[in-house]
Image (spheres, rainbow, N blue to C red):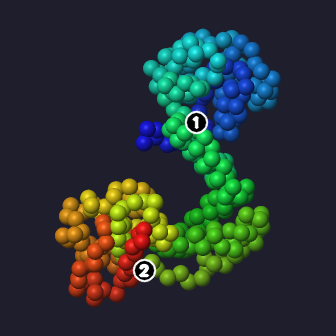
Amino acid sequence: MKYFPIFLEGKNISAMIIGGGDVAARKIELLLKSTTNITVMAASLSESVKRLVDGHDLHWLAHNYQSGHLMGMNLVIAATDDGEVNKAVASESQPLNILTNVVDQPELCTYITPAIIDRAPMIIAMSSSGSAPILLRMLREQIEKTLPNGYGRLADFSFKFRDHVKARVRGLRNRRTFWESVLRGPIGEQILQGNIPEAEQQLIASIKKEITPPVGEIVFVHTLDGNPDKLTLQTHREMQFAEAVFYDDDVNIDLIEYIRRDAEKYPQSITSSILINFQHALELAENGQKVIYLLAGHTQLPENSALSSSSILKKELISGA
């Protein structure tokens, strides 16, 4: 990745905006979603910037860019139409290790602002690393259409009951399954419709029921040519619930990106065409984990007595067939 994605805690931002025009206004409006600790440096302000400064009691340095005002700042945005001024801002801010964004001059930036879909507290940020803004806009439009406006209520609801569910539902995979059924089912629909009290009653009733401990399983995935675009929906779903994944150098490493990020990873030094580590995978599954074993190509699994005699659920999937 050319850019490292990161979210900044709004209360810790101390921002300087250089410029007082419409571009500056858009940057200020975005920052105001997280902080009011904003200073604007500009000899004059457009009506939109002045309204934001007055309405949110922002600090205004009523002069054009001058060096020496960036101490104590950790984020600066140069939003002027003067390339030399913007370059001077970057020259001052970057040696101070201040996050720097120069509008329309990516070569002077130490960070870029992503395309944002705001369903607070859910935030989706996307970037094409500056390479394809039109494609990024198209992707944003597609995602916007799939996310109901009340989607953030699902996150608020999950946070409120997170500790209750964690205390009652044992096992990470069980909790993932539980929450998926809640958020995708009737309770989630109630939340989206704003019927929060009804949703809370249904959730409380559901966590009072007896919930069985997690049952381990092993899913062997034959990845054929290893093309991630050919992953079947079933394979993708299985990978998203994985708690451990085995793979070797013959497996396309790009497939690992589709595994749940906090799953334990077990790279194998010997390829599966020579040896499959059945024993370790079985041990993890017998401890209640869901194990994904990625296999390059498609060859029949060799006979293994431990695997055959085990009561652990075993699946074989062919991805991309």
Q: CA distance from mark 2 to mark 1?
A: 43 Å
CB within 8 Å, label 2 to label 1: no
Q: Say the numbered circle drawn on residue 113.
A: 1
Q: Is residue 224 visible?
A: yes
**Label 1 element class:** loop
Badge nearest the viewer, 2 or 1: 1
What amino acid does circle 1 point to? Thr
Q: Position of residue 292 (x, y in %)?
A: 37, 70
Q: Residues within 10 Å of mark 2 (few under 14, many from 20)?
A: some
The quadrant where residue 116 appears: top right
Q: Say the numbered circle drawn on residue 31.
A: none
Residue at image coords 63%, 43%: 137
The quadrant where residue 197 appears: bottom right
Residue at image coords 62%, 63%: 158
Q: Is residue 172 left or right of residue 117?
A: left
Q: Say the numbered circle drawn on residue 215.
A: 2
Q: Is residue 237 left or right of residue 278?
A: right
The quadrant where residue 302 appears: bottom left
Q: Position of residue 68 (x, y in %)?
A: 55, 12
Residue at image coords 45%, 20%: 95
Q: Is residue 307 left or right of residue 182?
A: left
Of 122 and 305, nearer the camera is: 305
Query: Against 141, is 148 above or below?
Result: below
Q: Position of residue 286 (x, y in %)?
A: 34, 79
Q: Earlier in the sequence, mark 2 or mark 1?
A: 1
Classify the position of the N terminus by image quarter: top left
**Label 2 element class:** loop
What amino acid does circle 2 point to? Val
Q: Is residue 291 visible?
A: no
Q: Position of residue 299 (x, y in %)?
A: 28, 74
Query: Against 290, is 21 above or below?
Result: above
